[in-house]
Image (spheres, rainbow, N blue to C red):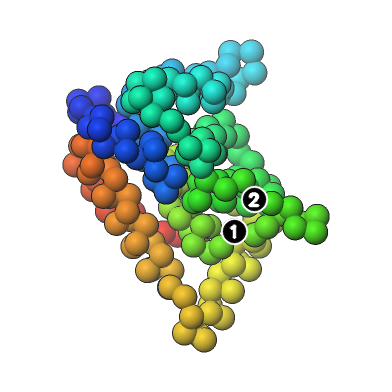
């Protein structure tokens, strides 16, 4: 995914690693540039699947490299990215979809409320889908996951009728602008910025 011919702005990267609001995509780019994608993900010859670095080892290497204390929200976002590259559960299982959406968008693991996992907001769902689309090849959602998305979109449509809350386009454009600002700060090549600029959401 990442070209090799660029130098990361370490001060900006350190600031973003300290910030619980930094996008998961940019956190992963910082990790991949620092440690090497080949050292984060690698094939398991016995199972045929992709394995990932131990998350605690990843966090420790980033903290040592940038002299930072990584907040739990950043850890949760990076953990979710590791799962996305090593499992299809986000696309197939509604509970995993909810958990990843909460973790990627806000660094939150979610809470059980009366035995039911809290639902992500439509902003969290859309922001996560945007980052997932930018990071990995697009996959089809299962029918059960698609129902979760459809229900959230219906809630957004109802809010639009009442003139409450942002539209889908506003959610995507605000998140795009935030990610571009973060990417520019760490000094990524222009092609990565253009890749994010060209993104179009499909549901």
Q: Residue at x 45, y 33 (%)?
A: 70
Q: How many marks?
A: 2
Q: Residue at x 53, y 64 (%)?
A: 122
Q: Which residue sits furthest right?
A: 115
Q: Position of residue 15 (x, y in %)?
A: 32, 38
Q: Position of residue 31 (x, y in %)?
A: 39, 28
Mark identifier at residue 120: 1
Badge 1 crowding class, 10 Å Cα cut-off, few under 14, some 14 to 19, many 20 or more, is: many
Q: Nearer the viewer, residue 163 or 84?
A: 163
Mark identifier at residue 133: none
Badge 2 crowding class, 10 Å Cα cut-off, few under 14, some 14 to 19, many 20 or more, is: some
Q: Tell me the CA gap for discs 1 and 2.
A: 8 Å
Does residue 167 lie above or below 78 as drawn?
A: below
Does residue 161 lie above or below 3 as drawn?
A: below
Judge from the rendering whether residue 5 lies leftward or rightward of residue 22; answer left or right: left
Q: Is residue 119 visible?
A: yes
Q: Position of residue 73 (x, y in %)?
A: 51, 42
Q: Which residue sits furthest top?
A: 46
Does residue 17 lie above or below 114 as drawn?
A: above
Q: Residue at x 43, y 52 (%)?
A: 130
Judge from the rendering whether residue 50 lies leftward or rightward of residue 115; answer left or right: left
Q: Position of residue 61 (x, y in %)?
A: 43, 20
Judge from the rendering whether residue 140 lies leftward or rightward of residue 4; answer left or right: right
In the image, which is nearer the foreground, mark 1 or mark 2?
2
Q: Secondary structure at mark 1?
A: loop
Q: Are marks 1 and 2 in contact (CB under 8 Å)?
A: yes
Q: Which residue carries the number 2 mark?
A: 110
């Amino acid at each position: 995914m990442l070209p090799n011919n660029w130098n990361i702005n370490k001060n900006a990267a350190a600031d973003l690693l300290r910030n619980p609001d930094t996008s998961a995509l940019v956190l992963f780019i910082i990790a991949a540039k620092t440690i090497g994608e080949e050292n984060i993900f690698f094939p398991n010859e016995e199972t045929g699947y992709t394995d990932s670095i131990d998350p605690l080892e990843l966090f420790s290497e980033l903290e040592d490299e940038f002299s930072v204390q990584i907040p739990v929200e950043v850890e949760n976002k990076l953990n979710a990215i590791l799962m996305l590259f090593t499992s299809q559960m986000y696309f197939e299982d509604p509970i995993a979809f909810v958990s990843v959406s909460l973790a990627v968008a806000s660094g939150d693991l979610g809470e059980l409320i009366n035995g039911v996992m809290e639902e992500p907001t439509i902003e969290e769902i859309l922001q996560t889908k945007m980052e997932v689309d930018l990071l990995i090849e697009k996959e089809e959602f299962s029918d059960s996951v698609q129902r979760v998305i459809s229900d959230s979109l219906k809630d957004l449509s109802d809010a639009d009728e009442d003139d409450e809350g942002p539209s889908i386009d506003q959610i995507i454009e605000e998140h795009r602008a935030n990610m571009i600002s973060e990417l520019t700060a760490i000094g990524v090549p222009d092609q990565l910025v253009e890749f994010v600029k060209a993104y179009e959401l499909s549901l």
